[in-house]
Amino acid sequence: MGRLDAWRVVFGHPGASCMPPSSNLSFAQVIDALRQKHGWQLADQIGQGGFAQVYKELIDGMPRAVKIPFAPLALSEEHKQRELQGLEVARRMAGHPRVVGLIHYELLAGYLVTVWEWADGGSLGQLLQQYQDAGQPGIPVDKLVRYMLEAAEGIDALNGQGVYHRDIKPENLLLFHGHVKVGDLGLAKIVGASTASHTGVGTLGYLPPEAYETHRLVPTVDVYSLVATYVRLRSGRLPFGTSATEILDRQRRGEPVVEGLWEPERPLVRRALAADPEQRYSRGAVAWVKELYRSLRERPASPEVPQRTSTEQGQNGAIVGATAGAIVGAIAGASLGAILGAVVGETLGAIVCAILVAPGGAIVGAIQGAKATSDKK
């Protein structure tokens, strides 16, 4: 099939004498057709998954992400229309602070092409990799809880409009100027159409087991995926193991990988990832994250989080040095309401470290140098 014939198949050119089945169009021909129709270059490929390829494209003077699937939707006409209904709801939510804006979508010869806001900061999956490259197991918990709350706000907004996302995972939580938006709504589906059936697409280990085994979705599907995502970003471990066999077995038994989580977090994670949908957390994504925050804030000091020595603190660059004169350092802030560890150093005499806990959780540390110590004498 030549390029002109491909154009006729895709767009129903009036000169076309016949219309071959849409599934006869190849991925490369869809790319060519999009270039001709919209004038897109589609030369800057920025990502590729198991189902689609993503390009960065300048559209109307703005950078956009164009997602093109490798194959047409293998659905009945009725199910295709339901998929499009979900995307239309998502498109109407453009401008929501916690949902990536869907700029444009079209069903082209069965290929569902979507155009999205461009995420300038990458994904939380990429951020996790940066922390791991720096020697940390996961994203620091104080940052991560804020990111999870922002993602939860996006999920609750979608669910409140009658849409399931169906593919919440680290790669689909995108950073815009340091804040998270829920992205890639290409699998979003109207709730009324989803509770009865599921097409089977999604990501193993993040989608609940009934979605694979009975092709059924329940209202907690996105909360389940968000909590699985939290486990991954928090501990650096995959939420249910590595192999497909292990993942499905753990999901059926409701046994996520909780190593690397603090003890107060574990019951909340296990409940949200329970095998039985009726036993899962059902009050929404934001409510779950708020309960998580409370559990972390109230967590007592435990052997799971060893106190750092002054040598370790110095090596990590937390507070370094003292001079012959007075050194006064003020450290303000709170990390989930708790800062662990005391800093003790010694240079030319004793350094006295006082930690005062102020109302509201602010912590001020005063480090007094050797001269101040000698003055007291």
Image (cartoon, grey):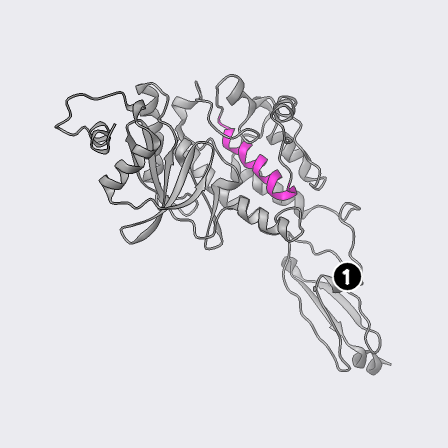
Quarter of the image where the C terminus is located:
bottom right
For image coordinates 39% across by 48% down, the residue present is: 118
What is the chief secondary structure element of the magenta stretch? helix
Residue 160: x %, y % from top left: 42, 34
Residue lying furthest right: 377
Left or right, 259 with respect to 229, comes to right
Q: Is residue 140 visible?
A: no
Q: Is residue 176 visible?
A: yes
State which region is magenta: 219-236
Residue lying furthest top: 214
Seen in the picture, residue 293 relative to 83 is either above or below; the reply is below
Left or right, 243 with respect to 30, comes to right
For image coordinates 47% across by 23% down, the residue present is: 200
Q: Nearer the viewer, residue 173 or 221?
A: 173
Q: Is residue 234 magenta?
A: yes
Q: Which residue was labeled with disc 1?
A: 342
Left or right, 329 with respect to 163, comes to right
Q: Nearer the viewer, residue 3 or 349?
A: 3
Q: Nearer the viewer, residue 305 or 172?
A: 172
Give the number of callouts. 1
Residue 367: x %, y % from top left: 74, 71
- Name the quadrant containing residue 185: top left
For image coordinates 67% across by 33% down, the residue present is: 257
- Name the quadrant containing residue 249: top right
Crowdedness near tag 1: few (<14), some (14–19) or many (≥20) residues, C-alpha within 10 Å: some
Q: Amino acid at mark 1?
A: Ala
Q: Is residue 16 magenta?
A: no
Residue 153: x %, y % from top left: 47, 42
- Name the quadrant containing residue 282: top right
